[in-house]
Image (cartoon, rainbow, N blue to C red):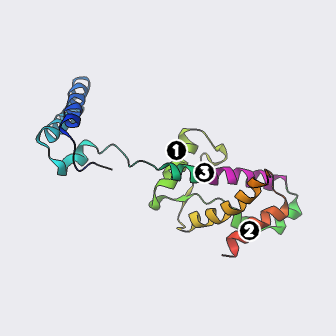
Amino acid sequence: MIPETISLVERQLLINQCKILSVFGDSTERALNERRIEILEKGYTGLYQKVFNTLYEEVPISVYKEVESILKMYSHINDSIRLLTGPDKEALDLGSLEFEGFDENSGMHYYMMSYLVDRMDEYLEYKGRELKSHNTTSLSKYNKMLNVHREFKHLKREKYSLSDLQKFVDAVQNS
């Protein structure tokens, strides 16, 4: 979030940083930092977005934990599906269990997942895949599935049987 006000001390620290950066930057960066210095020196609060335009809003820990839980749940589901026989796979509505990604337009979940997959090299099964869900209900679907996952986690169950996987399908379809 871009601040609406900055204390004099914080403004002076930012001005000093911009002065240092302008020494090391090229002419474009120097001009950018000179504008930032002027905005900060004169206290133009309406222009603070020009000073902080490279920063993103913080992703709350709750979003990280939710994305991490969903991706871990899907790791267990996908590992379990790979162990099923052909007829067992055919007995399940695998389409309803498919990971659709997150809705990019609703923000933080998508960007957190993308960072974990693409930059942190976690959950490699999703690397290189299109994971922008255009379905605004995907998060709701995942939360229904997480309820089932938590039950199994409480039972210390890491691999799911056909009937376990059917509980995930039922959770998605019956609500």
Q: Residues within 10 Å of mark 3 (few under 14, many from 20)?
A: few
Q: Amino acid at mark 3?
A: Arg
Q: Is residue 92 magenta?
A: no
Mark positioned earlier in the residue sequence (1 or 2):
1
Q: Quadrant of residue 51?
A: top left
Element class at badge 2: helix
- What residue is pinned by disc 1? 115
Residue found 74% across the figure and 51% down from its top? 76
Element class at badge 1: helix
In this image, 101 relative to 75: left or right? Answer: left
Question: Is 77 placed above or below 169 here?
Answer: above
Residue found 71% across the figure and 66% down from its top? 95
Mark 3 vs mark 2: in front? 2
Residue found 88% across the figure and 64% down from its top? 87
Mark positioned earlier in the residue sequence (1 or 3):
1
Question: Which part of the image, by quadrant, shows the C terminus?
Answer: bottom right
Looking at the picture, how far across and down is residue 169, in whole percent? 73, 68
Q: Amino acid at mark 2?
A: Val
- Indicate which disc residue 129 carries: 3
Q: Residues within 10 Å of mark 2 (few under 14, many from 20)?
A: many
Q: Quadrant of residue 117?
A: top right
How far apart marks 1 and 3 lie (CA) works out to 13 Å
- What residue is pinned by disc 2? 169
In the image, the segment drawn in magenta is: 68-83
Residues at circles 3 and 2 in contact by the CB criterion of under 8 Å = no
